Image: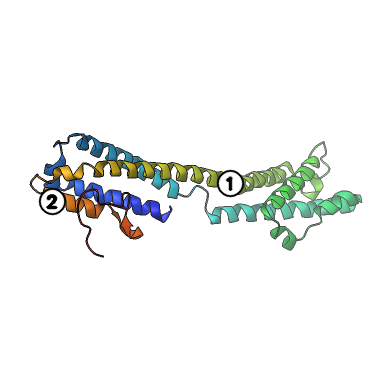
Amino acid sequence: MKTPIQNQLNMIATVLAVLDKTEFKAVWEDQMPVVFTGKVRTLRGANAKALELAKRQTQPTTGTTDDKTGTETLLENLLLEEAGLLMSFYEDKGDAVNLAKVSLTAAAVRHLPNQELLSLGITIADLAAALTEGSPAPGADYGISPESVAGLQAACLSFEKHIGQPAGARATRKQLTQKLEQSVDDLMKLLENMDNFIPRFRPRPEGEAFIGAWGNARQVIALGHRFGKKSDPAGATAPNP
């Protein structure tokens, strides 16, 4: 999460803590101007939604690196095993064209970019699958079986799922970030509106203390300045840093 957003959410939490103090509730709750009490309820609800967005925005949206590495290693191993069997088959049959497609080294395969590795895995699986058809199947004596082909195809699908997640995850996180930014912006505007009512509570017992606490809470501490209006809406003087 972007630090300014977190700072603003921290500020809102501080404001709500001030509002919830027993001695201050008697100052504002169901007191004139009573519209302020309704705005506090709106603030609580909107803040809860923003916090939920923040939670979702910071949650991992993809599998772990270990998961991706595991599927990649499995694909590489199965691909090399099947390619080795195909090499023997094509060499014996004198099929130079297909032999060139499966003449691979472990070092080369393990350094392939994700998409190229996936594409190669699919190619090897397709070549092997063609040799499992018929009775007897041409590749049966070489150990090329429907089971080995299915294993390689499954490894391809699993790896494709893992390498396809990042783009979708980035899009999801971007959408959540935009919603969170809008939600926090709306909260800031609501607080600015609420600032206008604060001086009205001065005549009440503990009114001055409430106004001072509100003014202090309305500072975004990490940013080093009061958020929103440059003038102090509560008429309180912020403490010297």
Q: Quadrant of the C terminus?
A: bottom left
Q: Who is closer to the viewer here, 156 or 214?
A: 214
Q: Which mark is residue 167?
A: 1
Name the residue rendered at 54%, 44% in the picture. 171
Q: Is residue 178 left or right of residue 139?
A: left
Cα–Cα gap, marks 1 and 2: 53 Å
Q: Is residue 217 left or right of residue 30?
A: right
Mark 2 element type? helix
Name the residue rendered at 13%, 52% in the picture. 209
Give the residue furthest to the right.
94
Q: Is residue 122 left or right of residue 1?
A: right
Badge 1 crowding class, 10 Å Cα cut-off, few under 14, some 14 to 19, many 20 or more, is: few
Expressed as whole percent of the image width and height from the top left, the position of residue 32 reads: 14, 36
Q: Quadrant of residue 65?
A: bottom right
Name the residue rendered at 64%, 56% in the picture. 73
Query: Which residue has dot 2 on it?
Result: 208
Badge 2 crowding class, 10 Å Cα cut-off, few under 14, some 14 to 19, many 20 or more, is: some
**Number of residue marks:** 2
Tell which circle, 1 or 2, labels the residue nearer the N-terminal end.
Answer: 1
Closer mark to the observer between disc 1 and disc 2? 2
Expressed as whole percent of the image width and height from the top left, the position of residue 69 reads: 59, 56
Name the residue rendered at 14%, 47% in the picture. 24
